[in-house]
Each structure stands twice: as structure tokens, then as C-alpha cells.
Image: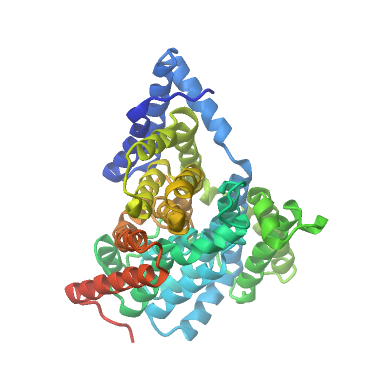
Amino acid sequence: MEAVNVGWLSILPPIIAIGLALITKEVISSLMIGILSGTLIYTAAMGQNLVVDTLKNTFDLMGSRFDLNIILFLALVGALVELITRAGGSKAYGALMNRKLKSRGSAMLATGGLGALIFIDDYCNCLTVGTVMKPVTDRYAISRAKLAYLIDATAAPICIIAPISSWGAAVISSLPEDSHLFDSGIHAMVATVPYNLYALLSIVLIILLSLTNVDFGPMARAEARAKKGDLGAVDVSSETKLEVSDRGSVWDLILPVIVLIVVSALAMLENGGYFAGGMTLAEAFGNCSSGPALVIGSFVALVFAFVQFVPRQLMTAREFMNGITEGIKSMVPADIILVLAWTISGVCRDLLMTGDFVSQVVQSSNIPVQVLPAVTFLIAAGLSFSMGTSWGTFGILIPIVFAICETVAPALIVPALAASLAGSVFGDHCSPISDTTIMASAGAGCDHIEHVSTQLPYCIVVAFCCFFGYLVAGFTNGNLLLTLGTSFLLLIGIMVALHRAFGGEKDN
């Protein structure tokens, strides 16, 4: 389908979808209405039949945006989660962590630490961390909303500062090949890491929240309910449906997850061309296709789980296959939301040229170069929030940032480039139509809209500090010490103020 420029109308579909989702607390119908509003605008602009062609364009776009590899990966990981639970691996791991971890704060730090270790891909991160840590956080009465935030804040924010990851590959592929400002794409990617304030401050905030136990806004209410026994879980534990094996061990959880991660990474390197020779690890990850690799990794992990569980009689072969069926069923709601999120992103990018409209507004604004990093951060955040995609956002903005900075502000190229990445992750982190946000909800077994509403104040606090950090970067020609110092001190100051206002108690 040919794209059409409809000006400010291009931002209506995401506004409608997001607004309805936050008002009604029902994300599927909100996304569908947003999609239909976008295809209706497109159909009218093209002079087509408003009824027949609106529906035809909607489902044609949905089919073109459908990523079978990711859907298969989610189904297979859902099955793996179910089988690990039935085998008793999650139960055993929870018992071990209950002995090793001494407080709610240590459980949150362990969750964040595991998220930081799984940096290869955000989908793999969300579902793996959720699988491993749900039994632990449940034991310490940590709400599923808080677990979803911990997962989400260590998914994209970690991946975006890891050059050897699917996200690093996406960033490198978006960089202009003919730029003389950097020796290579990997060089440019690494240079942005110290200036990626949203990623760095998100990590700091997780540590502060874990150590001080300060919660505010909707998250404070969710945590208060959790301490009374209402965790806010929307997934149904296998323990309530079938008998869970009492002979399972921690290795019944750890080994399948390790196999999933290692095989996925090797498959990424294989389809990226590393084993054919002539490529570095970074180049191979930059050239890989993560979707097929994740499917291979999850399938091999399932085969490994069969060999690990059935011969030891943790379950029969029939029970194993029934577990696969139930696990796939558990992922259907997340799959539906994900397909709709992909579709509304396609409405914005492929039909209505939302990114081009925003880009034109930026280029015609004639803003002072000193505020370029801060303004880039805000624009990236708004665009990513609206479209629900980090990759699509920085793919649009990076060429614009390069074009502006090469001409008028070469000293600000790294802070401005980092700001486009940071803003993209911030908007994606907050957006209810973001696939990563949806996966964090699914991984934690948390209601999706509750996840969005509870984490939003935390994300805004971090973004507020980032904005002032990028202002400092702009007016100091990218002085790293002043940029980081301003952002970190502002975040700590806000947390101290919140600590005094809400009277958080430190766990013992």
C-alpha cells in the first residue's frame, strides 16, 4: 500500500488508541479502534470506499506486519514456562531464593540483576526473567506490577547500551554509512553509552527503589495490596490446576533457561554469518535476524526439557505434551495485543507517514543548537510513545540528527544521538502499545494497563532528570561529567524528597 501524507491527522490513531486504553483499561478494543481510525483516514485520503476498503486495508496491513517468528517464540516460551512450573523447577528455585534472600529489597535487586545479565534480546529478557523470578517475588509479597516494572526497566534500557544485542544491531544498522564522524557503526554505538541517560538512570532508580523501599503513585497502592495478599496476578498458576512435582530441583529451571539463552545467541551468530568466517562478533550480531534465532533457541530448550523431565518421571510424555498445549494457550492474549500493536505501528509508519510529519516539524522549527539534545529527547519520546516502537523511532531520527549536527553542531553529535536513543526507549517504555511493554506484562503475569499506569510515574521521574541532563550537555558542548552529575544528583534529590514525603521503610 502506498503511504500518504495527511499532516496532523497522522498522530490521531495512536492518540485515540492510547487515550482509550488508559480510560477504559481495556487494551484490545482500544488498539482496534485506533487501527480502524487510522485506516479510515488513509482510505478517505486515497479516495477509496470508506467501508469496504477500510476493512480491506486494515487486514492487509495486519497480515503484512505479522511476525510469525516472534509469535512462535512466545508460544514456545509459554510452553517452556508451563513445563518448568509443572516439573517443580520454579517451586524449587523459589524455596532456594527464600533461604538465600533476606528481604524484599534483595529480591528486587536479584530480579534487576538477572534482567541486566540477559542483554541479548528484550523479548528473551522479559519472558525469562518473569519465569525465573515470579516464585521469588511472590514469596516476598512483591506485586506483579512492581515485578513487571523491574522486568521492563531492565529489558530495553539494558539492551540499548549493549552493542552485542539485537537492539545494538538495530542502532548500528540505522547509522549513516558515509558519515566521517565515526570510524564505524560499533564505534558510534559505544560512544553513546555514557550519554544514554535514560538507560543509566533507570538502572540507578531500580537500585534506589530496592534499597529504600520507597514507592509512590499507583505503584504504592499496588504494593500495599500485595502486602495484604493481593499480588495482582492475572496468570493462573499451574499449581492450582495440576499437581506440581515435589522432586523437581533448581536445575530443572536453570538448565532449560541457560539452553534457551545460549542456543538463541549461537543461532543469532550463525544466521548473522559469524561461523562462515570474516566477521567479528559485533558484526555478526549486527547482521543477524533475531526472530528465527529465538524460535530455534526456544525449540531446542523444549527438547532439552523433555530429555531432562520425562526420563526422571517428573511427568509423563502425555503430561509433557498437555503442558505444551496449556502453555501456548496462556500466551494467546499477549499474542493478540502484540499483533494489534504491530498493526497500529504500521498505520503510523507505512500508511500515514507519522514519522515524516514529526520530522518536518523538527526541521522547520529552527531551534537553537544548544537545546538540540534535550529537544531530540522529547521528540523521540513523543514519537516512540505514539508509535509504540523504539526501533522505528530512532530509525527515523538518527539520520536527521546526523544531518543537523554534521552541519551546525559536530560537538553535540554524540549527546544528540544518545538523546534520540534514550527518548526512544523512554517512549517505548511508557507506551501501552509497545511490544516490549506488552511482553513485560506477560512475563510478570500482570494486567497490562495496570503495568502501564503503575510504572508511568517512575519513568517520568527518570525522564525529567534526563531532560535537564541533556540541557546541560547542550550548553557545555557535551561535557560528560557535568551531564551525568546533573542527572544523577537530580534523581537522588527527587528520591530523597519522595522518601521524606512517603515515609518509606527500609527492609531488614
Residue at image coords 66%, 71%: 255
Residue found farthest to the right: 276
Of 65 and 219, nearer the camera is 65
Q: In the rendering, at what x and y percent does residue 53 appear?
A: 47, 17
Residue found farthest to the front: 408
Of 493 and 487, nearer the camera is 487
Q: In the rendering, at what x and y percent does residue 266 appear?
A: 72, 60
On screen, residue 490 above or below 73: below
On screen, residue 385 above or below 492: above
On screen, residue 271 above or below 312: above
Q: Is residue 112 visible?
A: yes
Position of the N terminus by quadrant: top right
Tell me if 441 is positioned left or right of 89 in this view.
left
Residue at image coords 57%, 31%: 63
Exactly how many numbered labels are in the figure?
Answer: 0
Of 134 and 171, nearer the camera is 171
Q: In the rendering, at what x and y percent does residue 483 appear?
A: 37, 67
Q: Is residue 418 visible?
A: no
Q: In the rendering, at what x and y percent does residue 25 appear?
A: 31, 45
Residue found farthest to the bottom: 508
Of 292 and 320, nearer the camera is 292
Position of the C terminus by quadrant: bottom left
Coloration mode = rainbow
* Image quadrant where residue 245 sits: bottom right
Residue at image coords 41%, 63%: 478
